[in-house]
Amino acid sequence: MENKIIIGKLGAVRGLIGELKLIPLTDFEDRFDNLKSVDVDGKILQVDYVKPVGKNLVIRFNGYTSRETAQKLTGKIMRVDKSEAAPLAEGEFYTFDIVGLEVSDLNGNKLGIVTEVLKTGSNDVFVTKSEDGREILIPALKRVIKKIDISDKVMIVDVAALEEV
């Protein structure tokens, strides 16, 4: 699953023809517009369609044409290959690239590893777990985050700026 990214979760069955509620787990909801196939539990499923219904999205898979067959997919996670990830602008990063980065201060002191990215609305917050198990919440602000190097798997933060937040 290392070359896969999560894009959504399958919710409750809707109706009798195999439709499921689709819970997007991506910032790029338009990625579902032309979705052809997804990985669900290691099995590639062909997508018949994804359509909006009210404020929700509904999905139907080829071969899952009844309520009973579709119900087996409820609660499952949908993944696609990383190569299908939506393009990013300069200075933007995927959540899956941020999680696992080693966080250090400007002096090279290790603060911990990013374990989670919280979407707060105004700015993301990187949950960083230190070696002693403490969590450090680091806001994704330019004055705090001084460097992110995905290839070297490191993030450098200005602790003084962190204390001002």
Image (cartoon, rainbow, N blue to C red):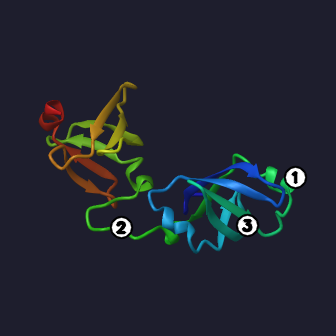
The nearer-to-camera label among 1 and 3 is 1
Drawn side of residue 78 relative to residue 130, left or right: right
Q: Tell me the CA gap for discs 1 and 3.
A: 17 Å
Q: Tell me the CA gap for discs 2 and 1.
A: 39 Å
Tell me what residue is drawn at x 75 percent, y 66 percent.
Answer: 61
Drawn side of residue 57 relative to residue 19, left or right: left
State which tag comes first along the sequence, 2 or 1. Answer: 1
- Looking at the rendered structure, the secondary structure element under dot 1 is helix
The three-letter amino acid code for the residue at tag 2 is: Leu
The three-letter amino acid code for the residue at tag 1 is: Glu
Residue of label 1: 68
The three-letter amino acid code for the residue at tag 3 is: Leu
Q: Are marks 2 and 3 in contact (CB under 8 Å)?
A: no
Residue of label 3: 45
- Residue 120 horizontal/vertical position (percent): 36, 41
- Residue 95 horizontal/vertical position (percent): 41, 53
Which quadrant is the N terminus positioned in? Answer: bottom right
| Residue 99 image label | none
- Residue 122 horizontal/vertical position (percent): 29, 45
Residue of label 2: 88
Tell me what residue is drawn at x 55 percent, y 63 percent.
Answer: 3
Q: Nearer the viewer, residue 137 or 63?
A: 63
- Looking at the rendered structure, the secondary structure element under dot 2 is loop
